[in-house]
Image (cartoon, rainbow, N blue to C red):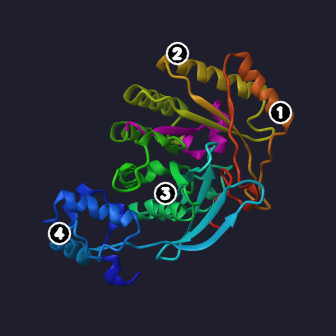
Amino acid sequence: MTADALEKIPLQGLVPEELCRAVPGVPIDDARRIVAQVHRDESVATPSSLIRRTSREAVVARGIVPSLEIVAERKSQIDPFVKYALRTHDGHVVETVRIPLEHPGRFSVCVSSQVGCALACAFCATGRMGLSRNLETWEIVEQVRIVRRGLPAGARVHGVVFQGMGEPLSNLDRVLAAIRVMQEPSALAIDARAITVCTSGLPTGIRRLAKEAPKVRLGLSLGSARRDVRRRLMPIDKAHALDEVITAAAEHVAETGLAPMWAVTLLAGVNDRPEDAQALAEMVLAFRERTGANPRLSVIPYNSIAEADDPFSRADDAAEDAFRAELQARGVFTHKRYSGGGDVAAACGQLAARG
């Protein structure tokens, strides 16, 4: 973008009330219609009998609808997942994944919230990148818009999951602003209950998410319920111990009434032993007793981070079956999350802006 364009307001990052504040004098009914135009990919400069000329001209003078460049669009050959590599105006590349849902014609979008990530989870390719910068609100929203444009006729974006590149709660101002646009009826009109924000464990962010987006679901990456193992896998545990994170998750339940999603990625010989399953079962049962909510527990097969020094390997079927059986014996049932697009590095933990 040019210097002049950078000074303008990205319109796809605003809800109508914010547009009224950003461009004084625009009434709310015009703001709603202009936001709807933006998200229908119509030019705001085109005269409309439904929008006052003064409003349209004021918004055109102050606003812009920037875009992300599609560097690559890679379709999986084994399932209907599609990965997009998108270049920002300053040359960074972020990745977004189109995820098919069980209901035909419905898709979810896995969006990135940062360029890279500072948390350095050992089993995540993004964590090896380090953090370059936060994404702006419009850059998060634009990922959904790009995926939507490529959908088959009659299909729609049903949900969004913040589980792409970056730690969403480290960029929470912009993530919350993007959620407002996603659920706004005149914008993307996605049910807030179909939006999930996943975190490695930032308690302050979890509490704020509960208060400011109470219909949005919380996802928590555990790594392991055993603290010594988790600390080796997820350095964030040194700043925020798992007990502190679980307390914040319990407060999220109290505030929202929503059961959280918990995820464990099984790593052969690291966190797939009987004692790992026992510790996880105890944590689930204690959370259930504490909150009355039953976490939706997903056990995820490890996806290689595709580097020569990858220190991990996927737990084999026998180890995974034994892990699940250990949980089930203690009254804890799991979901096997299908993590698709592995052949195009679109699966959980694989996003690293390689295109």
Q: Determine which quarter of the picture holds residue 242.
A: top right
Q: CA distance from mark 4 to mark 3?
A: 35 Å
**Residue located at (72% from left, 26% from top):** 277
User: Does residue 207 appear left or right of residue 220 in this picture?
Assistant: left
Examine the structure image and report whether residue 112 is included in the region drawn in magenta.
no
Vertical comparison of 281 with 77: above or below: above
Q: Which mark is residue 52?
A: 4
Q: CA distance from mark 2 to mark 1?
A: 28 Å
Quadrant (top left/top right/bottom left/bottom right) for the N terminus: bottom left
Q: Name the secondary structure under disc 3.
A: loop
The residue to which callout 1 is attached is 319
The residue to which callout 3 is attached is 113
Which of the two labelled residues, at mark 2 and mark 1, occupies the earlier sequence position?
2
Which of the two labelled residues, at mark 4 and mark 1, occupies the earlier sequence position?
4
**Image coordinates for residue 128, horizontal then vertical, percent:** 64, 59
Of tags 4 and 3, the one toward the viewer is 4
Amino acid on which disc 1 is placed: Ala
The residue to which callout 2 is attached is 289
Q: Are marks 4 and 3 in contact (CB under 8 Å)?
A: no
Amino acid on which disc 2 is placed: Glu
Q: Are marks 2 and 1 in contact (CB under 8 Å)?
A: no
Vertical comparison of 95 with 292: above or below: below
Q: Which mark is residue 116?
A: none
Magenta residues, as a range?
214-237
Mark 1 burial class by Cα count in 10 Å: few <14, some 14-19, many 20+: some
Q: Are marks 2 and 4 in contact (CB under 8 Å)?
A: no
Amino acid on which disc 3 is placed: Ser
